[in-house]
Image (tube, helix red, strand yellow):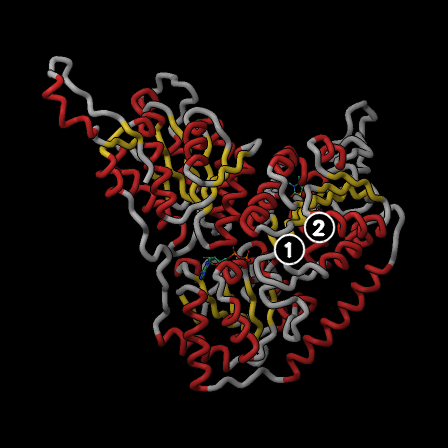
């Protein structure tokens, strides 16, 4: 319990004798200390933030009280770091920003956390309520509480110092219970300075009991789901990042292995079971989705990343067509069921409890593994695709293209399955997802549900701080630009982050030209031959510029082994790459041409 010692105010007319009892000066605390106490009481050990009034003092005091404060160069990156810390730990990541512009800078990442179902709390300082509400133009004035609301799971403001304990508890529970998400907590500067009796302050702190209570589906829902699975001829399991988040790794593996059902993994679920597991259908994804007669979704939404569960990807005729398949879905949010297609067997519950219940039922009633014709067909398709990929990867090109460089990266990363790989870009993202196998849970961190650029350095820092292990951030040159200034943060905290930039001189590729012949470059083109490695060197880190796969392997191996901030500028052919990577079909021009 931290507190400030302040003598209780005495009336000037009181005599010395009358003051006697007050020599034991009543202990006082204030808003600053109570915020810190409330966080500490709930096992928060790290705050990601960017200072300014009134956060500077709060950050200083937090550091003095033993909390780690990681200071960033832009709020979005601090909030992204907190978000990924939430995903990795199942505890809300904590970010702090100043008011109005600092808040808004952070809000995009807070919204991204909510969209991805990552638990976190963004705490922002705010200006005088009376002035904001009358729009009288305060320093950094904004109605932050209401601005946050559409983008977050919950948005709260604390007005009185004695409410800090319960407010922090409420924010924590909102962030991690049910479907996790981003929470905004508005902290008026005035509140932080409010004083109160320290003993009463101590009493006001709340340690949240069981912040994310188990949610167990009804027995009949379990039976229904197993009936659907048992009646399937060609079942497939789709693991999503909700399954990775759940930290029920051993039970999920046992369920997959006991049912014998082939499985697919969404991007961030790669590695939940090792990608080289005999039941992995990852290399036969298109075939499996088209041909399956039953799909079990475990913590994966049928959003755009899964073509909404309908249309040609799923064996349907056109994009509006529900394919003729049965769906079983485990999700903590009952509302997720029937979002895009009818769900035949909804399992509304947390993945840990639900999988445990399914396993128990299987042990009692047994489960016949799927027909060898189905698993054999998937294996055949997988083997053929793996062989095709191996051929592509072995063809060396100079200058390097994406596949040549990825082949080198894959071989190095295979030797370090324990490290986190952060990944963003277009081609750099889509191709790396297919080429680089993952072997352990929660090691692949990427652009996620929005396909957003800018998560790179925030996620890398959050992952390095949280895991204490080396992190590799594989970035398109455009993607890196969104958070690139944080290389200074990486150097300042001497974090074991190796940033690898696939530099092909532009967004998607670097060979576009201005059709007018004018001096301005084309909209997708960057400075040619840029040396991003010099940015890392500028702050005392290690820089490397590589032009061959051998140089890339060496620099990456050394970067990881050194445990020091490293940036490798990988020179990639500027003609390599596809516009928009694998989502080119979403470009209106391509869509119009198709019609
Ligand atoms: P992906 O992008 O990998 O397909 P999504 O983010 O679309 O994954 O889906 C994750 C789903 O997992 C969300 O619908 C979320 O409600 C759900 N989820 C998150 N945590 C849990 C949990 N512990 N138990 C059950 N479902 C969860
Ligand atoms: N802004 C934000 C916040 N998110 C986005 N996804 C985009 C813009 C659009 N965008 C993509 O979808 S990928 C991308 C942008 C700008 C960058 C692609 O170029 P890159 O990668 O250099 O990072 P490749 O590997 O060279 O294609």
Ligand 2 shows up in the quarter that is top right
Of 169 and 300, the residue lying toward us: 169
Left or right relative to 580: residue 265: left
Question: Looking at the picture, how far across and down is residue 119, in whole percent?
Answer: 45, 49
* Mark linked to residue 303: none
Please name whichever residue, 234 or 461, is drawn nearer the observer in this view of the structure: 461
Q: Earlier in the sequence, mark 1 or mark 2?
A: 1
Give the secondary structure at mark 1.
loop
The residue at the point 34 percent across, 34 percent down is: 33
- Alpha carbon separation for disc pair 1 and 2: 9 Å
Image position, residue 408 (x, y; %):
80, 55
Q: Is residue 595 visible?
A: no
Residue drawn at 65 percent across, 72 percent down: 277
Front residue of 537 and 430? 537
Mark 1 and ligand 1: say if the CB distance to the nearest ligand atom is below 8 Å.
no
- Which corner quadrant holds the N terminus? top left
The answer to whether residue 336 of the structure is visible from this angle is yes
Q: Quadrant of residue 215?
A: bottom left
Task: Answer whether labels 1 and 2 touch (C-beta < 8 Å).
Answer: yes
- From the image, tell me which residue sits under label 1: 419
Q: Residues within 10 Å of mark 1 (few under 14, many from 20)?
A: many
Q: Position of residue 57 (x, y in %)?
A: 42, 28
At mark 2, the secondary structure is helix
449 to 159, vertically: above or below? below
Q: Residue at x 40, y 49 (%)?
A: 43
Report which quarter residue 203 is drawn in: top left
Residue on which the image places disc 2 = 560
């Amino acid at each position: 319990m931290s507190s400030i010692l302040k003598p209780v105010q005495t009336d000037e007319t009181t005599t010395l004798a009358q003051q006697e009892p007050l020599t034991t000066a009543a202990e006082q605390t204030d808003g600053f200390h109570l915020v810190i106490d409330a966080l500490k009481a709930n096992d928060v050990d790290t705050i990601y933030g960017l200072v300014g009034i009134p956060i500077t003092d709060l950050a200083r005091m937090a550091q003095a009280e033993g909390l780690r404060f990681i200071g960033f160069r832009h709020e979005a990156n601090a909030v992204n770091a907190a978000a990924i810390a939430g995903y990795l730990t199942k505890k809300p990541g904590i970010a702090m920003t100043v008011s109005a512009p600092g808040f808004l800078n952070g809000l995009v990442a807070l919204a991204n956390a909510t969209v991805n179902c990552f638990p976190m709390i963004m705490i922002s300082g705010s200006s005088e309520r009376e002035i904001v509400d009358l729009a009288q133009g305060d320093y950094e004035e904004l109605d932050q509480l209401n601005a946050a609301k559409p983008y977050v799971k919950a948005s709260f403001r604390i007005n009185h110092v004695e409410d800090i304990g319960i407010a922090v508890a409420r924010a924590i529970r909102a962030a991690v219970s049910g479907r996790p998400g981003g929470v905004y907590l508005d902290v008026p500067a005035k509140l932080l300075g409010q004083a109160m009796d320290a003993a009463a302050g101590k009493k006001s702190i709340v340690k949240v009991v069981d912040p994310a209570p188990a949610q167990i589906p009804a027995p009949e829902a379990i039976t229904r789901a197993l009936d659907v699975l048992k009646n399937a001829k060609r079942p497939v399991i789709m693991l999503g990042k909700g399954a990775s988040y759940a930290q029920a790794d051993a039970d999920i593996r046992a369920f997959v292995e006991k049912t014998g059902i082939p499985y697919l993994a969404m991007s961030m679920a790669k590695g939940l079971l090792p990608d080289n597991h005999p039941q992995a259908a990852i290399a036969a994804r298109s075939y499996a989705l088209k041909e399956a007669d039953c799909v079990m979704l475990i913590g994966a939404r049928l959003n755009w990343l899964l073509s909404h569960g309908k249309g040609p990807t799923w064996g349907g005729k056109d994009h509006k067509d529900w394919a003729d398949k049965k769906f079983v879905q485990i999700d903590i949010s009952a509302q997720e069921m029937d979002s895009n297609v009818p769900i035949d067997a909804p399992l509304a519950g947390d993945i840990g409890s639900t999988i445990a219940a399914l396993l128990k039922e299987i042990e009692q009633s047994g489960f016949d593994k799927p027909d060898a014709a189905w698993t054999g067909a998937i294996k055949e398709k997988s083997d053929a695709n793996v062989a095709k990929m191996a051929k592509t990867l072995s063809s060396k090109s100079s200058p390097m293209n994406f596949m040549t460089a990825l082949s080198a990266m894959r071989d190095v990363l295979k030797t370090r399955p324990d490290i986190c790989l952060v990944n963003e870009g277009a081609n750099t993202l889509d191709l790396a997802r297919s080429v680089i196998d993952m072997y352990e849970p929660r090691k692949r961190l990427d652009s996620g549900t929005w396909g957003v650029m800018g998560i790179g350095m925030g996620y890398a820092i959050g992952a390095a701080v949280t895991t204490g292990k080396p992190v590799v951030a594989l970035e398109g040159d455009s993607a890196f630009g969104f958070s690139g200034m944080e290389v200074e943060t990486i150097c300042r905290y001497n974090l074991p982050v190796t940033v690898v930039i696939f530099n092909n001189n532009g967004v998607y590729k670097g060979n576009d030209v201005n059709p007018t012949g004018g001096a301005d470059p084309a909209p997708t083109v960057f400075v040619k031959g840029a040396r991003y490695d010099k940015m890392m060197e500028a702050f005392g880190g290690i820089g490397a510029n590589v032009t061959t796969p051998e140089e890339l392997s060496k620099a990456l191996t050394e970067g990881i082994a050194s445990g020091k901030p490293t940036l490798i500028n990988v020179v990639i052919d500027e003609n390599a790459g596809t516009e928009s990577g694998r989502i080119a079909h979403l470009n209106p021009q391509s869509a119009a041409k198709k019609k």
